[in-house]
Image (spheres, coloured by chain):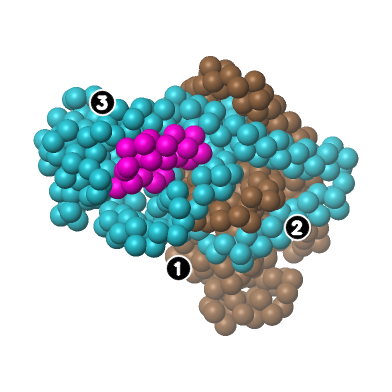
Chain colours: A cyan, B brown
């Protein structure tokens, strides 16, 4: 099997290393030539991905930001083989999938949206690792949900990189859920750390939940701005929802009303229980 | 050395087990006699704490909720030895310390406030473990900050339970910081999970930060209501501060202004860097 990887940052670099570990031939390319050369030297890729070997790829994973991913696909579509499956790895799916489904139709190519569900606070090839996606879900957004043969082929190729599960959804549902599960924690963490109290002796007088809530405050603001802007309808709604919830706790405190506060807390506890019951425990580490 | 432990829940039970592991004699008591008997059977305590052996204790740790802790100290003060050091383990310190400093003065006893900085989402003796406090800080709130001999003696006894560091502060500073580092994550997590999106396929389409942000949504609403109410001035201020921050991100999204959004994210990233520089990485697990 041969895999092409476009973009050798944290995600692309980790995919390359994982596939190399699985004895898959990897062709890779980064817009920064130094990174491509470094990946070659580190044997994270076998060869530079180019117009020649692109045709031989069974799978091409595009691990760059949404705007660049669409641009790359449009420019390289003529060189991509008809048997190759192209999957992007962008963190939002509506905009990218809409554009890429069109390009795929135009050139008679096979494309679907993808989102490998893992990450780290620090990006770049230097932080990539073969184990980043170990047991993580890989979310797929196919244009048609009835091509079982294609989905089985894709699943087989994806699982080789160490993923634990394949999730299949629509770009709309993906973006709605991701606004809540991933974008919100990044916004909250980034805003939370702005409290002046953080500069008091916060590391000593704290335990695990503080570590949890401040971990992703450090982020790549350029990448996240693009992802947040593409998802601003869903994300705005979640932020407004949380502001509403926080206001209720604050009002109960202001009113010095322990019964109201306890009711609010019991409601949240019941929601957590309902989520665990419906969705099961979430088992993935990293972000 | 002999330690008395009042309350054999998650905190008291874990302290008992940790001291037993360090070959310290442990006298323990829980208001639920079944728990006391269970702790005896499990050899987490050597004997039931009573009026007789209370006098022999070098250290008494009071691991019950704030209101009960003050009540226990007032009722038991006549039985406590003059050489015994009494430390409560409540999560807020102003109210408890004020009351207990008075009681200690009245009876000529040695008391200081304490807060072992670790925990778990699930409470009770059955979730206690000898390793809960491994490497965690134990925060102390003494009445006078100049009694080095006393502080050294306390430190020596505390460290036997596996703590990594002793932090010494005032009840005011403790409560201000704890509102931010621990109470806020619990409020946010409890409110965050109330989003209806949580019942979508949130476990599949998520990664580490979602796990982080929903972990402490499940909480003991009675205990936390008491802790939040005792700290409602500091906590309200932090909630209002976060609502203000979230509003700024939401407004940038509403205005479809990527530059403003990126600036907000860069500011949060800079705050995180400043905190790491000033306070160092936070190393404790659990909550």
Q: Magenta segment: does it hold A101? A: yes
Q: CA distance from mark 3 to mark 1?
A: 57 Å
> Residue at point 32% right, 56% down?
A154
Left or right: B147 in relation to B21: right
Q: CA distance from mark 3 to mark 2?
A: 51 Å
Mark 3 element type: loop
Disc marking residue A31: 3
Mark 1 element type: helix
Mark 2 element type: helix
Left or right: A46 in relation to A103: left
> Residue at point 61% right, 66% down?
A277
Judge by depth and name the residue closer to the eye, B210 or B120. B210
* 3 or 2: mark nearer the eye: 3
* 2 or 1: mark nearer the eye: 2
Judge by depth and name the residue closer to the eye, B88 or A287. A287
Residue ID for mark 1: B21
* 3 or 1: mark nearer the eye: 3
Residue ID for mark 2: A266
Q: Is residue A258 above or below residue B6?
A: above
Counting from the top left corner in percent of width and height, residue A264 is at 78, 51
């Amino acid at each position: 099997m041969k895999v092409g990887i476009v973009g050798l940052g944290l995600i692309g670099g980790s995919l390359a290393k994982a596939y190399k570990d699985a004895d898959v031939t990897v062709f890779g390319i980064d817009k920064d030539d130094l990174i491509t050369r470094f990946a070659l030297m580190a044997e994270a890729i076998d060869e530079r991905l180019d117009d020649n070997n692109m045709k031989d790829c069974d799978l091409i994973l595009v691990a760059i930001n949404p705007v660049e991913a669409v641009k790359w696909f449009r420019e390289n579509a003529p060189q991509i083989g008809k048997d190759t499956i192209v999957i992007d790895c962008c963190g939002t799916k509506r905009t990218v999938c809409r554009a890429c489904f069109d390009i795929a139709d135009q050139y008679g190519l096979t494309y679907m949206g993808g989102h490998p569900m893992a990450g780290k606070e620090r990006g770049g090839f230097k932080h990539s690792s073969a184990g980043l996606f170990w047991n993580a879900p890989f979310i797929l957004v196919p244009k048609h949900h009835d091509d079982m043969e294609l989905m089985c082929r894709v699943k087989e190729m994806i699982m080789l990189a160490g993923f634990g599960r394949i999730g299949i959804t629509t770009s709309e549902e993906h973006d709605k859920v991701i606004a809540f599960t991933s974008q919100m924690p990044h916004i909250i963490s980034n805003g939370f750390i702005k409290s002046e109290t953080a500069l008091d002796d916060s590391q000593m007088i704290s335990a695990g939940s503080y570590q949890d809530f401040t971990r992703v405050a450090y982020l790549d603001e350029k990448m996240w701005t693009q992802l947040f802007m593409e998802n601003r309808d869903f994300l705005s709604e979640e932020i407004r929802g949380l502001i509403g919830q926080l206001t209720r706790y604050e009002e109960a405190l202001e009113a010095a009303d322990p019964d109201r506060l306890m009711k609010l807390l019991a409601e949240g506890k019941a929601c957590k229980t309902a989520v665990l019951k419906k969705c099961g425990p979430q088992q993935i580490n990293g972000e």
